[in-house]
Image: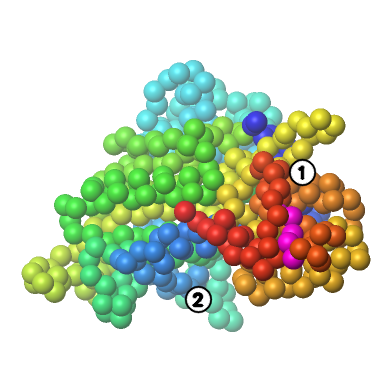
């Protein structure tokens, strides 16, 4: 079944996945906190990405760069001059909106082909005026001319607030990788082709955030810059596109809810040779999930120019020197989590009730198992099993109050793949009942083998 955003948000709050930020103070616009269950799911997605892109890869290396960087980094990357959205204000209700979004929506509704990506401020203003586009808030058509609004959060380093101490919260994690290219090649003896991977926070002062955790001002990226020899970049671009598609399915995202949209020439950034977006069918429509771009050698050349440092590479075998090209797959952790939540949500009609179940892939489920003593008298034995499993590194939970049926339902709603019931046959037989979430089938397993069973069935394929 298809979940609605209202149902998903309600479940996330009631079951401890995601809470509104600063909730007891009435919230703070477009900020969200991950609860006890949500943070486990969130971290498991990051662990899965790290496992597939770093741990299992012989050619990729990890990195964790500072959020605050020398302001010259953003001058070199073009963010200071060009990282902006085209905004306009409604004179009637004073609301602010993105001109390109309004034009795109109007063009789609009227089946018009409009090169929005290549339109400058004057062209956007002219289109809005000519077609009398209405304000999405009040419905009137009276806008100010379009102006560029820089998306970077500005802050100050040190004790004075002046232009010398100005710095920025990074709007992407990629630039930290580029400025460390020389450090990694030297210290790790990395040979092209190789990737540098990073998971970290980024900040963008978006004017139109929304759709729950889909578009945020504070978000986390799982990003790789893959350095390769020029003229091999398009081959690697296709390789990583296929690799990323397979990874999304390992997270439990359904193939039928994914599509790949290749950017046409008008959409491409001036430095990009090719760009593709993985789009996911969210309850509010198709939205970008994962972007993959062939950035050529633009970034390394720009940082070499502004820093004065050589950022080329010399092949130790052939002696050839060149500036590597870069293929960049960049995935937002929050968007990945939202897609996982949407595909996992299910409602199943049983004889006397509707069962809500989150069908997470076991490898990323918040808790891999729940230990349930059938009665309080069995809690000591159950507690011993619970502690033994946690020592084996299994993330599990313990649930005692209520009927066994109600406890199963609680675990179904947070996506726990296995429930282990310690019952009155455990003492004489040394076995426990293991109930599987999706089929609700039950088997008996020797108590000493439960941990191995859970570990074997919760691996990332």
Most distant residue in the top direction: 110
Task: Measuring from the top left, give residue 389's x and y in whole percent.
Answer: 67, 69
Q: Nearer the viewer, mark 1 or mark 2?
A: 1
- In the rendered structure, the answer to whether residue 141 lies left or right of residue 167 reads right
What mark, if any, has residue 197 been given in the picture? none
Where residue 301 appears, x then y in whole percent?
Answer: 24, 63
User: Of helix, strand and loop, which one carries label 1?
Assistant: helix
Observer-nearest of 115 and 43:
43
Task: Provide residue 248's location: percent of width, then percent of height.
Answer: 47, 47
Q: Is residue 209 visible?
A: no
Kindly report the distance in space between the C-alpha atoms of the residues bearing marks 1 and 2: 44 Å
Task: Answer yes or no: is residue 345 visible.
Answer: yes
Above or below, comparing residue 460 to residue 101 in the picture: below
Query: Circle 1: is it few (<14), some (14-19), or many (20+) Cα within 10 Å?
Result: few
Task: Please state if 263 lies on the left or on the right of 436 as rendered.
Answer: left
Could you tell me which residue is drawn at 50 percent across and 56 percent down?
460
Q: Main secondary structure of the magenta part?
A: strand
Helix or strand or loop: what does disc 2 sit on?
Answer: helix
Magenta stretch bounds: 430-434
* Residue topped by disc 2: 165
Mark 2 crowd level (few <14, some 14–19, many ≥20, 10 Å Cα): few
In reply to whether residue 427 is colored magenta, the answer given is no
Q: Check disc 1 and report the residue beneath it.
A: 10
């Amino acid at each position: 079944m298809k979940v609605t955003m209202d149902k998903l948000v309600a479940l996330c709050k009631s079951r401890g996945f995601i809470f509104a930020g600063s909730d007891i103070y009435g919230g703070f616009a477009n900020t969200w906190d991950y609860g006890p269950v949500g943070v486990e799911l969130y971290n498991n997605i990051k662990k899965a990405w790290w496992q597939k892109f770093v741990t299992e890869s012989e050619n990729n290396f990890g990195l964790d760069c500072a959020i605050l960087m020398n302001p010259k980094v953003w001058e070199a990357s073009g963010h200071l001059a060009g990282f902006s959205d085209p905004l306009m204000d409604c004179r009637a209700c004073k609301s602010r909106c993105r001109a390109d979004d309004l034009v795109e929506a109007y063009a789609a509704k009227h089946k018009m082909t409009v090169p929005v990506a290549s339109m400058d401020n004057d062209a956007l203003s002219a289109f809005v005026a000519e077609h009398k586009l209405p304000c999405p808030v009040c419905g009137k058509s009276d806008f100010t001319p379009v102006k560029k609004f820089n998306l970077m959060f500005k802050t100050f380093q040190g004790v004075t607030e002046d232009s010398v101490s100005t710095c920025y919260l990074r709007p992407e994690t990629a630039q930290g990788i580029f400025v460390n290219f020389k450090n990694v090649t030297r210290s790790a003896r990395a040979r092209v082709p190789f990737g540098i991977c990073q998971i970290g926070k980024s900040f963008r002062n978006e004017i139109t955030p929304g759709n729950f955790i889909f578009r945020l001002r504070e978000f986390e990226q799982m990003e790789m810059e893959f350095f390769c020899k020029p003229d091999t970049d398009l081959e690697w671009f296709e390789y990583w596109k296929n690799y990323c598609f397979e990874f999304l399915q390992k997270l439990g995202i359904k193939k039928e809810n994914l599509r790949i949209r290749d950017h046409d020439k008008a959409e491409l950034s001036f430095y990009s040779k090719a760009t593709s977006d993985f789009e996911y069918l969210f309850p509010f429509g198709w939205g970008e999930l994962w972007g993959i771009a062939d950035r050529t050698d633009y970034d390394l050349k720009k940082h070499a120019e502004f820093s004065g440092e050589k950022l080329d590479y010399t092949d130790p075998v052939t002696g050839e020197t060149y500036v590597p090209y870069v293929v960049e797959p960049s995935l937002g952790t929050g968007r990945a989590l939202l897609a996982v939540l949407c595909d996992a949500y299910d409602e199943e009609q049983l004889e006397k009730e509707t069962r809500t179940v989150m069908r997470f892939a076991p490898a990323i489920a918040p808790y891999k198992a729940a230990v349930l003593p059938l009665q309080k008298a069995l809690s000591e034995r159950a507690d011993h099993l619970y502690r033994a499993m946690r020592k084996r590194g299994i993330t599990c939970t313990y649930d005692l109050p209520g009927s066994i049926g109600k406890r199963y339902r609680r675990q179904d709603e947070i996506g726990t793949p296995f429930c282990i019931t310690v019952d009155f046959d455990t003492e004489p037989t040394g076995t426990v009942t293991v109930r599987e979430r999706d089929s609700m089938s039950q088997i008996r397993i020797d108590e000493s083998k439960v941990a191995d069973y859970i570990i074997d069935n919760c691996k990332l394929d």
